[in-house]
Image (spheres, grey):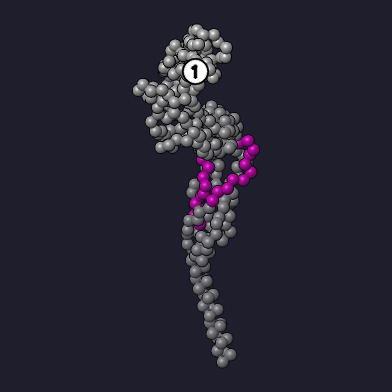
Amino acid sequence: MLKNWKDIGIALALAILTWYLLTGREKVEAWVDMSVEMTNAPEGLIIRKGLISKIEVRVRGPKGLVRSLDRRKWTYSLDVSRLKVGENLVDIDRERIPLSMAYEVVEVKPSRLILSVDRLARKELPVVAEWRGALPKDHRLLEIKTVPEVVEVRGAERQVRQITQVRVLLQNDFDEPPALWTEDVPIKLAEGLEANPGQVKMTLRFGPEVKAAWLRVPVRLGTTLGTTAQVSARHVRVQVEAPLALLRVAEAGGDIPGLAAMVKVPDGLKPGRHALRYELVVPEGVRVLSAPGGTVDVVIRK
């Protein structure tokens, strides 16, 4: 019984050896992808164009070994220590391809690279912010700003030299715009350039649409107890800048709520006509542009 097991084991070993010899002698070819990594990069230089992320290598070798190539991740080290400013022709060195001597390198795609190299430059540039969107009627954008207002741009000297500012764009529609809107906006630059920081905080300030207009402002008297006074003019003309919604009220013949010319009548005035100064009280969002005269006639009665 033991002798039979030995015979079976020997036969099995011979079969495996025969299969290995047959398949091992059979030569096959396959394409293998290899990622490209730079080594010995010279300080102060940057590759603008021509660098690729991978190469393709056609190899020939024993069938069993070739089939195992796809199970690993291969990396080709590209030595860029001799790069200079300008166009550089760099060959893919087959001797640097990380394969054992059991494989034959038949072809490499691409076999050489043309690298465009420039000096690395940095520049601080102002950020110009822009907002595009829709607002409801009678609203407008009052202010737009970014934090920070200046960023550092890094890249090829030729590219950096040509730009004078960094633009950021925010696109958003508002049905009911808030007084303040803040959002982080990424900085988008041409390929090969990068900004530090890579985004800015953009703040938008909204408010009502305003217009300058001349209005009839009601006069209000402030008197002490026991004083009888009457103003000669019930309104004064004042130029203001106010929201359109309020101006429509005035155009329809009404008074703007909270807008008045206040006259404080001092104690001890003798009966008769007196020219007294008035002080304008304005609601939020209204700004006085001009108030000619500044006085009204007040009649003090006994």
Badge 1: how crowded within 10 Å, few (<14), some, or many (20+)?
some
Q: 183 left or right of 139? A: right
- Amino acid of disc 1: Leu
Q: Is residue 245 magenta?
A: no
Residue under label 1: 221
| Residue extent of the magenta highlight | 35-59
Q: Is residue 42 magenta?
A: yes
**Can you tell which quarter of the image residue 72 is in?**
bottom right
5 relative to 278, above or below: below
**Can you tell which quarter of the image residue 254 is in?**
top left
Please state which of residues 127 and 256 is positioned toward the viewer in this rendering. Answer: 256
Q: At 55% across and 36% down in the image, what residue appears?
A: 200
**Residue 257: percent from left, percent from top:** 44, 26
137 relative to 263, above or below: below
Q: At 49% across and 11% down in the image, what residue appears?
A: 301
Q: 53 left or right of 208? A: right
Q: At 51% across and 60% down in the image, what residue appears?
A: 70
**Residue 265: percent from left, percent from top:** 53, 15
Asked which secondary structure carries label 1, the reply is: strand
Please state which of residues 268 and 100 is positioned toward the viewer in this rendering. Answer: 268
Quadrant (top left/top right/bottom left/bottom right) for the N terminus: bottom right
272 relative to 32, above or below: above
Identity of the residue furthest to the left in this view: 252
**Residue 263: percent from left, percent from top:** 51, 16
Is residue 96 at all visible to an observer of this figure? yes
Please state which of residues 264 and 140 is positioned toward the viewer in this rendering. Answer: 264
246 relative to 173, above or below: above
Please name the predominant secondary structure of the magenta segment in the image. Answer: strand
**Residue 220: percent from left, percent from top:** 47, 19
Q: At 51% across and 40% down in the image, what residue appears?
A: 50
